[in-house]
Image: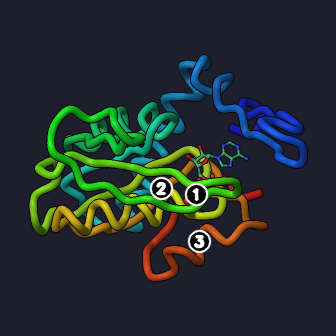
Amino acid sequence: MRRLLVDVVDYPEPGIIFKDITPLLGDPAGFAEVVESLAVAGVESAGEVDVVVGMEARGFILAAPIALHLGVGFVPVRKAGKLPRETHAVSYDLEYGAATLEVHRDAIAPGQRVLLVDDVLATGGTVAATRELVERCGGVVAGVAVLLELSFLPGRAQVADLPVVALDVV
Ligand code: AMP
């Protein structure tokens, strides 16, 4: 996986090392292995889940095949204004400015156990906001699964009470 994740220095702004997953996505054997490994590791740490939630946009690419692998539904969490029916919305702070994420109100039934999937866990703001959306629906976040954790940022601390699995940590 390390060979297929490419560091892009100073993108999208100076000081950021962007982890580009597109070479991994273009490698069918690597992509398949990552999907399977993340699905297995996710339920090993979170327990059985009813739903996999992916965050726009790179979370979708991983969460959808993981949901299929686990035989459960996929729910997209989208940026503001993209979902056509009634939503819950949560706003949170980014390094610069703010963002709003939304989920369809009926996408997760009360009591359903949910695995959150994204490519990179950085500051943890995205995961924490998504957790709030799941809980507003009445769901329970059972765990978080990411390809890569940036351990020099406080992502894990934002969801310290949840199991978090990462295939790699830098
Ligand atoms: P955060 O909310 O800070 O944990 O950021 C997580 C979101 O931002 C994820 O959806 C990632 O796709 C993206 N992200 C943050 N930092 C990076 C990075 N260094 N490389 C690639 N994606 C990143």
Q: Earlier in the sequence, mark 1 or mark 3?
A: 3
Q: Is 108 left or right of 80, judged from the image as shown? A: left
How dense is the environment of label 3, judged by Cα within 10 Å: few (below 14), some, or many (20 and up)? many
Q: Is 79 left or right of 123, judged from the image as shown? A: left
Q: Position of residue 45 (x, y in %)?
A: 41, 67
Residue at numbered disc 2: 145
Front tag of 2 and 3: 3
What numbered label is drawn on residue 156?
3
Label 1 amino acid? Answer: Ala
How dense is the environment of label 2, judged by Cα within 10 Å: few (below 14), some, or many (20 and up)? many
Residue for point 73% across, 67% down: 153
Provide the secondary structure element on which disc 3 rests.
helix
Residue for point 52% across, 35% down: 58
Q: Earlier in the sequence, mark 2 or mark 1?
A: 2
Mark 1 → mark 3, Cα distance in angstroms: 10 Å
Front tag of 1 and 3: 3
Residue at numbered disc 1: 166
C-beta proximity under 8 Å, tags 2 and 1: yes
Mark 2 → mark 3, Cα distance in angstroms: 11 Å
Q: Position of residue 3 (x, y in %)?
A: 77, 33
14 above or below 91?
Answer: above
Residue for point 26% across, 40% down: 74
Residue for point 31% across, 37% down: 69
Q: Is 51 left or right of 98, judged from the image as shown? A: left
